[in-house]
Amino acid sequence: MSRNIYDLIGLAAGICFILALKGLSSPKSARRGNLIGALGATVASVIVFFYANEGRALNNQTLILSAIGFGVLVGVPAARKVQMTQMPQLVALFNGVGGGAAALVAIVEYLKLGSDATTAVVIATVFTVIVGCVSFSGSIVTFLKLQELMTTRPVIFPFGRQIIGLTLIGVLLSGGWVIASGGTTPLLINGLLSLIFGILFVLPVGGADVPIVISLLNAFTGLTVAASGYVLQTTLLIIAGTLVGASGTILTKLMAEAMGRSLFGTLFGAFTATAQQSAGSAETRPVKSGSAEDVAILLNYAQRVVIVPGFGLAVAQAQHTVRELADLLSAKGVEVAYGIHPVAGRMPGHMNVLLAEANVPYEQLVEMEEINPTFPQTDVVLVVGANDVVNPAAKTTPGCPIYGMPILDVSLAGNVIFLKRSMRPGFAGIENELLYDSKTTLLFGDAKDSLTKVVSSLKSL
């Protein structure tokens, strides 16, 4: 394969990546965008085997094919069997593996070039190793947090900010050491310190802020891939890495804004938090609970109902049942909409994808900015598995983990129904005062079972 043909095919693959990002910007075209991106990645991987760089044959083909085969054996079952509730963890894990792989490739290429490496290549290598290692170890920590293999709360320790700062200085100094003198030992020290910094970087983050860090680390991985593309002199890697880095950065900014805080506050706010609500008294305060029949009657006589989905809906796999309920209400002449918070669930788009599985009409999915002004005219809000995204503490309790986060103003509706398993607080670990409001009714139990009972009762009315 000639260089020109190789470059043209690589350009086509790059265009596929751009079209994939465009498709992923809307639920209607997300599936098509994903397939286009997968096609581009497949083409980019295959053409390498048909191009010999400067007359040199491709070496270690058996090892390369074995690695690809192993990745397919692990990745395909993991992607097909993962539950929707575990998708963010899978994204974090795959993202971390990508960053670690880019760092390893850069190290191998650096060792192969030896003294022939130019200063620019060495700088790109150091950048790739630092950012790739931070992305790898940080993503592993976010995976452990979301999988609840470790505490989801911020992990703070004495002199935490100072230790993190000193570790970062060590990373930068060791990177400078590599650039100034070269050698394998300085590069390995730089990689080790970067791995440690990645862990320390993520530990202070907890609760609903973890998905923001996943997005940031995803952007890091993109920059790592772009830098490794420079080291390997591969334009396609530069294109792909730049796209991932840019889109990840934009997404991180949007998520931080949706949480109502700066990125610095997201990463280090745990060290400066002055007040947090305690959930210890949640079981001792009176709440108004009801039965499925009570909820069905309230919904039956409503003119407008807004459904607010959350992570609990995903856990219960109740998306099909909630759609059945919405269809039944619509058949009775009730106006139904879904209020979607930007960070509902564990990552942006989580609820959109979940509801799309149940064929919920896209026009019924209404973003927070559009749905909030309509709550005063809403008769009933049905909160299914959400908590933090409707918690008034985000507006009324300075110092709490979610203070400043824009929320769905469900408290302005005529009636609020919470479907909850228990009085346990949400992912941020704070109490929700709305649960004790006189207009709020709690329906305890598994969301899918509770919704099934409500549907049965509604059909009998």
Image (tube, grey):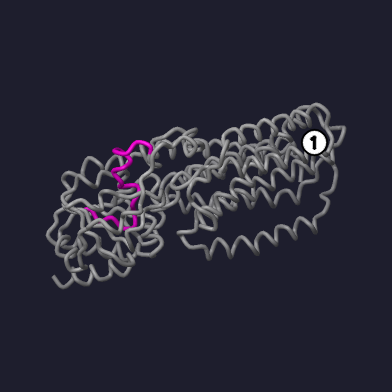
Q: Where, by quadrant of the figure, is residue 302 drawn?
A: bottom left
Query: Type of residue at label 1?
Result: Pro
Q: Where, by quadrant of the figure, is residue 111 drawn?
A: top right
Q: Indicate the position of residue 341 as horizontal and vertical percent values.
A: 35, 46
Q: Indicate the position of residue 155 as horizontal and vertical percent values.
A: 53, 46
Q: Mark 1 points at which residue?
A: 186
Specify whether residue 419 is in view: yes
Which residue is at the front of the view, 70 or 194?
194
- Is residue 137 found left or right of 209 in the rendered image? right
What SS does tag 1 mark? helix
The residue positioned 20% from the left and 61% from the top of the image is: 329
The residue positioned 64% from the left and 62% from the top of the image is: 74
- Quarter placement of the C terminus: bottom left
Specify whether residue 19 is in view: no
The residue positioned 49% from the left and 37% from the top of the image is: 271
Up-down relation of residue 238 to residue 23 (above or below): above
Up-down relation of residue 416 to residue 392 (above or below): below
Badge 1, how many Cα within 10 Å: few under 14, some, many 20+? some
- Is residue 316 found left or right of 451 in the rendered image? right
In the image, the segment drawn in magenta is 381-399
Up-down relation of residue 200 to residue 73 (above or below): above
Q: Indicate the position of residue 264 as horizontal and vertical percent values.
A: 49, 33
Which residue is at the front of the view, 116 or 137?
137
The residue positioned 16% from the left and 45% from the top of the image is: 377
